[in-house]
Amino acid sequence: MKKLIVVLFLSLIYHPVFSWGFFAHKKINYYAVFLLPPEMMVLYKPNIDFISEHSVDPDKRRYVNPAEGPRHYLDIDHYGSYPFPELPRRWKDAVNKFSEDSLQQYGIVPWWVETMQQRLVLAFKEKNHSKILKLSADLGHYIADAHVPLHASSNHNGQLTNQQGIHGFWESRIPELLADKEWDFFIGKAKFIEQTQDFIWRTILESAALADSVLQIEKNLNQNFPSDKKYAFEERNGTITRQYSSHYAMAYDQKLNHMIERRMRESIFAVASFWFTAWVNAGQPDLKSLTNKSFTENDLKEFEILNHAWKNKSIMGRVE
């Protein structure tokens, strides 16, 4: 009886899930490094652990900065019907039409990706070791978020259709189960992107087009799956929790026709290509001189503050 009580208690511990989840974000940034040319690999490969581990800093930042949340999503269906012509793609035009407060309310991820991309170009021009690595890690996070269908939907966690929890199910539970065992991340090489703004907006529209399938397929599966097999007590990150069972997760992945793997692969390619494009647009600076640089005390303090806030404070803004 005591053991059962402990298990039930652990199952009620609340763990917010953001974007791709920590596991998938780290994998995306990690694999993206291997798509870079040798001239960039000289800096990125020795720092691959940093770029991977700090891919989740934007999620941790949601515990210290109330402005962080909207940078991860865009409830684009708020602005009409696909392909949402009423929403200007240029930030200034969108602000003039809807106001910045309104845009912040429904998410700004495509515009924020452009902002971060411009900052990374400047960091390359300055040959600033710390900024290049931190911005690369952060940019990878936001680009990956733009590939998540529920990040382009007002029904971002199935809260409007009685499917609460589908957010973390799609982007965290299933990658944790299948990415290392079954998915293929042999992708090719990064490519130069002529128009990064057009690229990220195409990505958002692709995500928006997939959102209904993500929700409807899970709803249909739920109606036809044995109710006693849907959930299970399983280990996750060292803790026994009640979550979607492995059988239910794999059935959902099959019904989605491996959509999650495709979007993860597309995220990896996009992240590497944005990094590569920023480097090219900065004039392809020689990065070999940066290989022996280290982070400043201020950088290390920043990382410490983020970790402390993530472990000890409450999230600011909406919870996925």
Image (cartoon, rainbow, N blue to C red):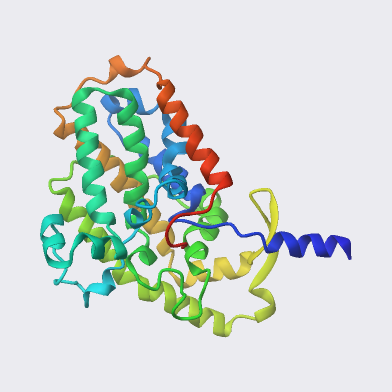
Left or right of 46? Residue 203 is left
The front one of 2 and 263 is 2
Kindly give the residue lying farthest to the bottom in the view shown: 223
Left or right of 317? Residue 175 is right
As displayed, is residue 262 above or below residue 228? above
Left or right of 107? Residue 21 is right
| Residue 179 in view, yes or no | yes
| Residue at point 32%, 53% (across, down) | 71
For residue 82, which quarter of the picture?
bottom left
For residue 297, which quarter of the picture?
top left
| Residue at point 43%, 31% (across, down) | 48
As displayed, is residue 116 above or below residue 252? above
The x, y position of residue 273, in whole percent, is 25, 42
| Residue 46 in view, yes or no | no
| Residue at point 27%, 68% (across, down) | 76
As displayed, is residue 132 above or below residue 176? above
Kindly give the residue lying farthest to the right in the view shown: 1
As displayed, is residue 263 above or below residue 189? below
The front one of 66 and 279 is 66
